[in-house]
Image (tube, coloured by chain):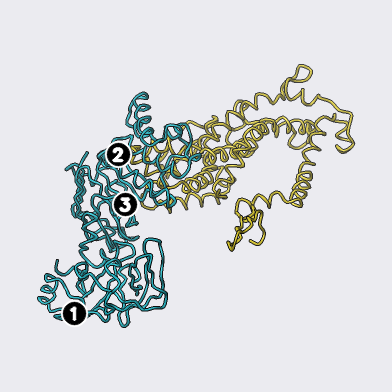
Amino acid sequence: MTDTELVIPPSGNAPVTRVPVRADTSVGRVRSALTSRAASLVALVIGVLWTIPTAGIFIQSFRPKTGQDSAGWWHGGPFTLDFYRQLTTGLHGNNASSLLPYITNSLAIVIPAAIIPMAVAAMAAYALVWIDFKGRDWIFVAIFALQVVPLQVAAVPLLRFVVSGWHVGSTTIVPTLGLAGTVGAVWLAHACFALPLAVFLMHNFMSEIPKDILEAARIDGASHGQIFRTVMLPLLRPALAAFGIFQFLWVWNDLFVGSVMSGGSDTISPITVKINNLIGATSGAGGEVLPAAAFISIVVPLIVFLSLQRFFVRGLLAGSVKG
Amino acid sequence: MAEVQYVEATRLYPGNPVAAVNRLNLDVADGEFMVLVGPSGSGKSTALRMLAGLEDVNEGEIRIGGNDVSQKPPKDRDIAMVFQNYALYPHMSVGENMGFALKLKGVGKEERAAKVLAAAKLLDLEKYLERKPKALSGGQRQRVAMGRAIVREPSVFLMDEPLSNLDAKLRVETRANIAALQARLGTTTLYVTHDQVEAMTMGDRVALLKDGILQQVDTPRNLYDRPGNAFVAGFIGSPAMNLVKVPVSDAGAQLGNLTVPLRAGTAAAVRAEGLKEIILGVRPESFTASESGNGLRVKANLVEELGADAFVYGELPGQKTIDTGDDGGAKPFVVRFDGRIPPKIGNEISLDVRTEETHAFHPDSGERIGD
């Protein structure tokens, strides 16, 4: 508190008026910590280091198989667009390895797989935060505790549930839902695995909304449904956007759930499964197209991230800094 | 337009045996401005929220316009509420905030806009209808919160400390505006505050609560002139009334070196009960500088000069002033002096007491004795 930005000179015996410098406020502290010169340098170095592998793959994706086989990417040319042609429009009339249909498949998986948990989690969080019922704290803890269940452990039981429903002995508790081999199975799996984190995020964000606002809406005559739609959802937008982007990127890059739940069907497999199949499982043949395939697959998430990144940052910081 | 009745209304919080609001009986007439006042934890806000439907009524009932509403949800009570933090919807413009309740009620767009505009005119908010609450000053936000209540034309207004987030100057202005607006609209209003100045200046009647129990309901004048018990006496008035436990004899109450004669009714009641001591209450302004010099001697420990008045904070030798507030400790003895002739700090002053302005309270129960 010794440093001052502005000192108003005292007249008479009035005490000196000290205006706090920016660094004294909490927002200011965060800001000045982020604008320090050394920190910028460190961030720059980290950024460059992290970009090198990506840049390497990018260069590699333009080098023909002979170049890739004989020397590392830093040796440079000659360059070719053949791999990109092969993976999109097709090369020499052969478009068997085109990734374009799989981009559509991936979009058909990713968009619902992001929206379903967003919608369910927002409603669950509303109930857990604003509706007073017995055991709601325990339910919240239990939901969050499900985070510890590894995806890989739950995948097979979930697949069995999708294929044949849920039976205890000979008693059927949930009948076969007919989701096996459909894109619905993939949505269900992604939504299930995303929900614990989604509910947790929405719950924390929602509990920072002042209770007065909810009470004002109740007195204004709104039902829970109306409060949720007209008051809470608009206020949740930053949190929903942040989670939605997270989930979008995570699901887009997922290979495991996609390959287990899609059952290898060409009509629903996501792009990651297709890319995985481009390379021979034992021979490694076809590996030369992978760099180009990787770049094609990141085009969509890149667009999403760049166009929505302001929501992303805002949503992650929401509530952590007052001001 | 409707009258409000609390009938033995009680609020119990689970796990707490002491009722937050204990058997409250209160009648608010149609069009009346009723202020609920009390220290923090007195249950005044809880009582208001019970009427709003935000708190359960565990026993008794609450009636609006003669109908029991205790078990009805807020929206079926025809009330509007102004919150301490205004509770404006941050994502809606001022106009949308004010029209939200009408929209939910299914009022058409044009009628809604007309009503919002009328309320905005009343509150001088027309220029801000398109703005978000974030872009308004505290006073403007407060007016939007008022506007949101007015637009609905409810039968009862509820206000929960609506001025406590404003700065002192704006609070005084807004205080007068709210009182004038209420008089103009003629809507029954319940107003919660912890500030006894607000209570005295705004209310047609004031209900004073302490620990969930109603202490007294009366006009501000009567509350000031005839407090029903020692707590009310100590709470209403600033600086507070001096309350001193004094021995009493046939000649009167022994305050310091002075024997203060009791009024006939009080003296009779004291005799009838055979009391040896009473709590004597004297307001700071019921003293005058003694001309004879034989008055009550008080040592001036601190003098506060306010221009027109000077308040002398002193002590009575051998007697302690009672604080009826939370801590129950001793308080200084306060005397109002003419601001032009303040005593010096450390001097002893001599005072006459206007005996017709003294109050007597029971030493144990604190109830008023006599008339």
Chain identifier of the residue bearing label 2 in the image? B
Give the crowd class for mark 2: few <14, some 14-19, many >=20 residues within 10 Å.
Answer: some
Name the colour assigned to chain B in the rendering.
cyan
Task: Pinpoint residue B222: horizontal percent, then vertical percent.
Answer: 21, 58
- Amino acid type, callout 2: Lys
Nearest to the observer: residue A131 or residue A151: A131
Task: State the quadrant of the N terminus of chain B.
Answer: top left
Q: Residues within 10 Å of mark 3 (few under 14, many from 20)?
A: many
Q: What residue is disc 3 on?
A: B192
Image coords of residue B348 (percent x, y): 36, 79
Residue drawn at 79 percent across, 43 percent down: A48
In the rendered structure, the answer to whether residue B7 lies left or right of residue A43 reads left
> What chain is colored yellow?
A
Instruction: Choose top left, top right, bottom left or bottom right for residue B179.
Output: top left
Give me the C-alpha separation between circle 2 and circle 1. Answer: 57 Å
- Looking at the rendered image, the disc whose residue lies closer to the viewer, 2 or 3, is 3
Q: Counting residues from the N terminus, which is met first, the one under dot 2 or under dot 1?
A: 2
Please tell me how crowded label 1 is: few (under 14), some (14-19), or many (20+) other residues with Cα within 10 Å.
many
| Mark 2 or 1: the one toward you | 1
In the rendered structure, which amino acid carries the disc numbered 3?
Val
Residue B304 coordinates in the image, percent (x, y):
41, 67
Q: Quadrant of the C terminus of chain B?
A: bottom left
Labels 1 and 3 within one chain: yes
Picture residue at 25% right of the left edge, 47% below the top: B33
In the image, which disc is placed on residue B248?
1
Callout 3 secondary element? strand
Can residue B99 be seen at all in this image of the molecule?
no
Gap between marks 1 and 3 measured at Cα = 39 Å
| Tag 2 and tag 1, C-beta contact below 8 Å | no
